[in-house]
Image (cartoon, rainbow, N blue to C red):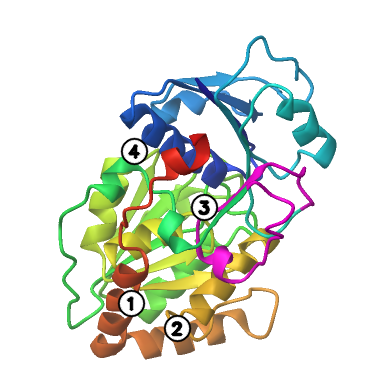
Amino acid sequence: MVLFLTEYFRSNGLGHLRRCIAFSELFESEGIKTKILVNTDHEDAEIFQSELNQQNWLVQNQLETWYDAIIIDSYRAEAADYEHFKQYTHHLVAIDDDKRIEYPSGCIIYNGGLGGLVYQYDPNRYKKILVGPEYALLRKEFRENRIEKKINQNIDRILITMGGSDPLHLTSKLIQFYHSEFPSSELDVIVGPGFTEFTEEEFHQFPYLKIYRNLDARSMCELMLQVDLCITAGGQTIYELGKLGIPFIVIQTAENQTGNISGLVKSGVIESYIEPSRGDFLTNLSQLNQKLTNVSVRQNMSTKLKTIFQIKSFDIVGSILN
């Protein structure tokens, strides 16, 4: 059995949980049983339709058995915590986005995404280093998608998704802004379970607005394929958009997104992104909107994304267990 230790709080962590669910699906598809322990302050983790076990594993850290592998996806665990769990397996995997800490020697480093193009890990310290967009974890609905995204001439439908908690409380501002910038376009808005300062009532008179809560992976995939442009935070969602070839504008909402965003720039997918704390946020956003109204720019981005996030033949399960 493979054990996942992760976290999901109202302030952050939705991407961690989704990533572990996607990882778990890979093992389960190979006939390997998995278990996910989630350190959380939520009571509604069952919305993810997965076998989740809510436990503060950083405090209740005594495990009852040996595991084929233990995979930790956390921004709270310290090096000593990784050392502790190392005694329960031969294969300890540290999921990392930005070289957060120095992980124990002999463990496996996993940075499955664009951050792998930016950060360098010591090959003499770690047993294996699995990095780069070819290792990006996607939920099965995105991995198995066979629909070819058509890039339309106009931007008639826009998706806004600021993650599970929208820590900078940008969603309301973005709705007002895009309603003004594209008054005849449809707006689809994802409201995450950790939103604390968003109320739908203030937008009830917006004729082309649809607000969604608690979308499962299939519904999210179908929605993404229908839009012409997505306004997104720089976390796990960009990998799903990338696999589908959906043009997007990135807004950095957390420090740990730096690797992903730097990788997008380095790979030539984007030239710039939005940092809400720098400059005139909405003016910068308007400039990117104008650039992406050009259909050839969006088509070029879509092509690059599908090339980078093409599902390749890397056996992640085998790479960890063998």
Q: Please tell me whether mark 4 or mark 1 is closer to you in this view.
A: 1
Q: Which residues are magenta?
A: 101-127
Q: Please tell me whether mark 1 or mark 3 is closer to you in this view.
A: 1
Q: Examine the structure image and report whether residue 116 is included in the region drawn in magenta.
A: yes
User: x, y percentage for residue 296?
Assistant: 25, 89
Residue linked to disc 4: 216
Residue linked to disc 2: 268
Q: Residues within 10 Å of mark 1 (few under 14, many from 20)?
A: some
Upstream in sequence: badge 4 or badge 1: 4
In contact (CB < 8 Å): disc 4 and disc 1 = no
User: x, y percentage for residue 81?
Assistant: 79, 32
Identify residue type, mark 1.
Lys
For the image, the number of numbered tags is: 4
Residue linked to disc 1: 304
Identify residue type, mark 2.
Gly
Identify residue type, mark 3.
Gly
User: x, y percentage for residue 161?
Assistant: 45, 57
Upstream in sequence: badge 1 or badge 3: 3
